[in-house]
Image (cartoon, rainbow, N blue to C red):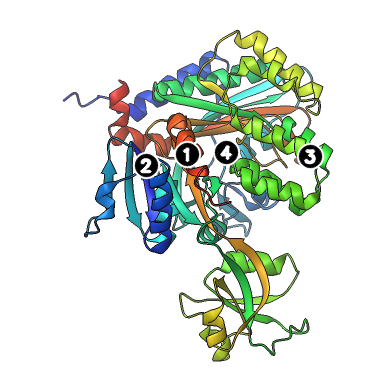
Amino acid sequence: MLNIALPKGRLGDRVYEMLKAAGYPCPALEHPDRRLVFENKEAGVRYFWVKPSDVTIYVERGAADLGIAGKDILLENRPALYELLDLKTGICRMAVAGPPSFQDSRDRVLRVATKFPKIAGDYYAARSRNVELIKLNGSIELAPVLGLSDVIVDIVETGTTLRENGLAVVDTVCPISARLVANPASYRFRREEILKLQESLAAQIPE
Amino acid sequence: MDRYQLTQEEKLRFELRSLYRAHGYRPFRMSKFEKYELYAGYKDFLVSDRVITFQDTNGELMALKPDVTLSIVKNARYTPGEKEKYCYHETVYRPTGSAGLFGEILQSGLECIGDLDVGDEHEVLCLADRTLAAISVESVLSFSHLGILHSLIGLLQPESGTRSRLLALVANRNAHELKALFLENGWDLRLLEDIRELLSLDCEICEMESILAKYAWVSKEVIREFSGLKALFGESCPRIRFDFSVMNDTRYYNGIVFQGYVRGVAEKVLSGGRYDALLTRMGKQGGAIGFALYMSLIESFFLSGEGEKDA
């Protein structure tokens, strides 16, 4: 039985549909109740719903053999996992955003608010830019509006939230999408099962 | 209950000590702390660059030992044609778990340092395999050879950032981003196919010579090394398997590298390889190969009852 950690929410629903089409359905999971664990012995899968940012922890610690994690979580937490597929769903981008009038000036430290200090830190380190990283846990768009930061580094899907808060994308840091990740120990001891699922799921990835 | 009954972890410890001693490895005991300067110069060799430090009564900055290998290498003396063989069972101090708080980590292992040949590599690989087998019948020793990656990097000539990205993608089995990297850099896509093929392999050490001979870009020296290992291992060694994603820091490791896994433990329980490059960086002659077994993980494995199933 393969244990698979799915991220709660729309992304998890979309990926479950792909897994179902790939031959790994779980009817119990399609009738929502308060349970978090669902299994289909015939298909050889057990799914868990977990908080999206916790998926990699479940897989890294071996509670799940496989998981679906956003690239943002993988880049920020750098877990020791295998990244087997880009599922090309949950597509968005990590971007730098600021007020439309924002002009970077190298003669001062740039104040950057973000939920992703490692990703933002790497981005600016590659540009030899001296920054002050301000770690926030939500409502990042507020930071430049209230003068807490000059810019933000955050996930941008449609850009609507940015526009509604008077912000615009300054630069794209990297594209983001959902990835199939595997625990390295599971990959060794359940190789055939994992490769079979990987191959079937790859056939469901949109062109 | 017999009050003198040994725990599984204690039995394993005795079994390994006698196994290593039978192959000429002498116990290496060391102090719990070292001068901090030993670690300051080789922080990227350590699992974590965070070290517990304190000031000695003479004002010298000391560190609670975060690693064993550096202390052994520091004390090794090179004599042409000779080798020094040490085994250890020590506690190291470094950040653990997702919270990254400092913890005590019990480690066993061995190091072989000096004028090494393929026979020494064979011996250390066999001892790593037998170490895993002493823990569980369901174990695997995955190996790769950094010479394969060095050959590839020699052809592609990536600049430093791209090189790190390439290595990380191979280590993460990330074939989709490897393709993007090849396209970005205008590299020959036939080499990408070779990497993908190597990543898909799951074969024994005795098959490596003939497999690698198919790739014209792989160094002949690496192929010769596997030819030597094949002669020593014979035709079958099913628990020692090639895995191209196995990697160690290429600034210190330069040849065969390996990781051990036991069914029921979520992470590698053993890690090692050939690290001549560390000796060179420490201004020493000769070669070195060794491995560490993470006893804390094994202890939890035994306590979980998983080990009992094998017994």
* Amino acid found under the numbered disc labelled 4: Val
Q: Where is residue A152 in the image (x, y as percent from the top left)?
A: 59, 78
Q: Label 3: which residue?
A: B153
Residue B97 shows up from this direction: no
Q: Position of residue A109 (x, y in %)?
A: 70, 81
Task: Give the number of the mark in front: 1 or 3.
Answer: 1
* Circles 1 and 2 on the same chain: yes
How far apart marks 1 and 3 lie (CA) works out to 33 Å
Q: Which chain carries label 2?
A: A
User: Is B276 on the left-hand or right-hand side of A187?
Assistant: right
Mark 2 burial class by Cα count in 10 Å: few <14, some 14-19, many 20+:
many
* Circles 1 and 3 on the same chain: no
How far apart marks 4 and 1 lie (CA) works out to 45 Å
Circle 2 SS class: loop
Q: Label 2: which residue?
A: A24
Q: Quadrant of the N terminus of chain B?
A: top left
Q: Label 4: which residue?
A: B68
Q: Where is residue A118 in the image (x, y as percent from the top left)?
A: 59, 64
